[in-house]
Image: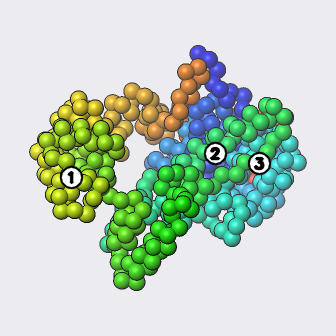
Amino acid sequence: MAAAMLEGIKVVEFAQNLAIPACGRILAAMGADVVKVEPPGGDAMRATAGLGPKESRAFAQINPGKRGMVIDLRSSKASPVVDALFRWADVALVAFKGSDLVRYGLDWDHARLVNPRLIHLTHTPFGPRGDDAEVGGYDALVQAVSGMGFLMNRTENGTPVATRPAVNDAGTGIASVAGVIAALRHRDHTGEGQRVDTSLLGTAMSLSLGTHGFFEMTDVERTVELDVQMAAAREAGEGFDGQRAVYEAQQHGQANFRLYFRHYLTKDSLISVAGLTNSLQQRFHAVTGIKRPENPRDHTSQEFQATVDQAERLFLTKTTTEWMAELRAAGYPCARYNTPTEALRDPQVVANDFVAEIDNPIFGKYLTVGIPMQFSATPALVEGPSPGFGEHTREVLAEIGFDGAGVEYLVTSGVTPDGSQTK
């Protein structure tokens, strides 16, 4: 088997939760040696859906294939360890507020002095500039600011509920991988390291490609009209669903999404159908036997509503499997509507290695998602368990240049506990 594509690349990860650890996860699957640095209390994900002391479902799924060490960055004696890691590493993944980056000696300006060849990925929730650059943030907040949530959030009692999973966290992990690899390629050419910035907000805006845009030729009057309509809806006390209906009717229309590009209840579960072209929509009517509306773009007409009602009743008469067989035979795109548990068992998911099985020495075997890209010549596999808390502290300290006495001092003094002190 060919060597993994990032074999020999060393990565140090100063980050918690999901977004940047997800980047480290993919880099590890590509063969990089990823050392995850945790605070003395452990990554916050170790306390989510626990499986034992400092072990959890969330941490195990986010951090397979990495080594782990603990550093108390608040200690005045921690800076030599941080600098040694910067000298050792090709890539540093850092997710701290800007003020904390400087406070703990993790900032790019310091790191580049220690190692000019270092790729320093700096992550902030809302981007490195602007009034919110220093504000902490999570996926739910970025869904709100980006407008993404307005389009996709479910509702409860008239208010939006943040979408799960945390799409911008996971998406930022993938975007960060692209940034790291591009910067490594630049270093191959020039020998220079550089800072790479990623953010949840930047990811959210990029994931909104196709729904977020403004064209002077068509949108000036429409935008003014929409602002007036939205203000009127809010003043009238419309809930979230009512406000979104105003937006959807003006910006996107609803015909396709109410009949041809949606999810239907079936006799035994749900089915997802997706046909936006005229030829596909003709196939929909051929399979269902439902007469096509005279004006299929006018979703407000009684005829169109009657067609939707007829389709909803019809889909309830057969199982999902039966409908899929008929629709696919006609070439109409459709798919099962899985729960997350069902998705892990879906034959298509399994056949493409989109799910991985890992064996952890503490709590045994578990399933988690694979990585989103595959390569014909070089392996990229999610394998090896997540690190135990402080499991590799001593090993990494020795590797980055500390002798036996130095390692013992750092561990026993609490600057870099190895986990045994906190069990």
Task: Identify the residue position indicated by label 3 in the image.
Answer: 195
Towards the viewer: 173 or 411: 173
- Mark 2 falls on what kind of element? helix
Q: Pinpoint residue 110: horizontal percent, then vertical percent.
A: 84, 53
The kind of residue on which mark 3 rests is Arg
Q: Of marks 1 and 2, which one's residue comes earlier in the chain?
A: 2
Q: Quadrant of residue 352?
A: top left
- How far apart in space, not on screen, are marks 1 and 2 (Cα)? 48 Å
Task: Identify the residue position indicated by label 2 in the image.
Answer: 176
- Mark 1 falls on what kind of element? loop
Q: Quadrant of residue 366?
A: top left
Residue at 56% from the left image edge and 28% from the top image edge: 380
- Using residue 329 as the reference point, say whether residue 388 is left or right of it: right
Q: Quadrant of residue 276?
A: top left
Q: Of marks 1 and 3, which one's residue comes earlier in the chain?
A: 3
- Crowd around label 3: few <14 · some 14–19 · many ≥20 (10 Å): some
Q: Pinpoint residue 46: horizontal percent, then vertical percent.
A: 53, 52
- Residue furthest toward the left? 317
Residue at 62% from the left image edge and 17% from the top image edge: 2
- Crowd around label 1: few <14 · some 14–19 · many ≥20 (10 Å): few
Q: Pinpoint residue 255: horizontal percent, then vertical percent.
A: 30, 55
Residue at 73% from the left image edge and 45% from the top image edge: 92
